[in-house]
Image: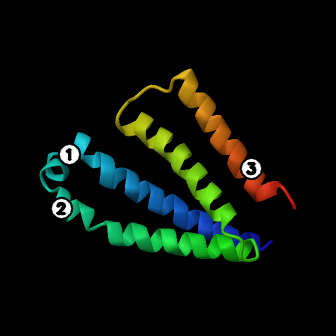
Amino acid sequence: MNYKTLLIGILFFIVSQIVIWFQSHLQFFNKWASDNPIILSSVGVVVSYGSIMATKHIAEAFGGLVYPSRFIGFSIGIILFALLTWIFLKEPLTYKSGVCIALAFCILAIQVFWKN
C-alpha cells in the first residue's frame, strides 16, 4: 500500500467533509447562508471535485479497490460531523453518538491497518 497516496486521499476527504458540513449547517447560525441557499449550493462543485480526488487516491493506494474509499470516506464524515456539530452547534454527544463515533474509528482503522 502506498501510504502517501492514502494520506492525500484522506486529506481530500477531510476537506470535502468539512466543506459539506458548513454548506449544510451554516444556515443554522448565519443569516446570509439561511437566506441564500442557491448561492451556497454552488460550493457543491468544490465538494464533488474533492470527493472524486479522494476516491481516486484511496483506490490507487489500495491497488484499484474502491470499497476502502467508501468506508474511509464514511468514517471520516461521521467523525467530522460529530466534532463540527459539537463545536459549532453546541449539540452534546450522547452515549449512543459516542458509540457510533467509536465504531467509525474502528471502521477507519480496519480499512487502513488490516492487511488482506
Which labelled disc corresponds to residue 30?
A: 1
- Residue 87, compared with residue 94, is above or below; it is below
Q: Position of residue 55 (x, y in %)?
A: 58, 70
Amino acid type of disc 2?
Ile
Image quarter of the C terminus:
bottom right
Which amino acid type corresponds to the residue marked 1 in the rendered image? Asn
Are there few (<14), some (14-19), or many (20+) residues within 10 Å of tag 1? few
* Residues marked 1 and 2 touching at CB (< 8 Å): no
Circle 3: residue type: Ala
Q: Which residue is mark 3?
A: 109
At mark 1, the secondary structure is: loop
Label 3: state its secondary structure. Answer: helix
Write the residue at 43% across / 42% down.
84
Mark 3 → mark 1, Cα distance in angstroms: 35 Å
Q: Can residue 57 be seen by looking at this rendering?
A: yes
Give the percent coordinates (x, y) of residue 51: 49, 68
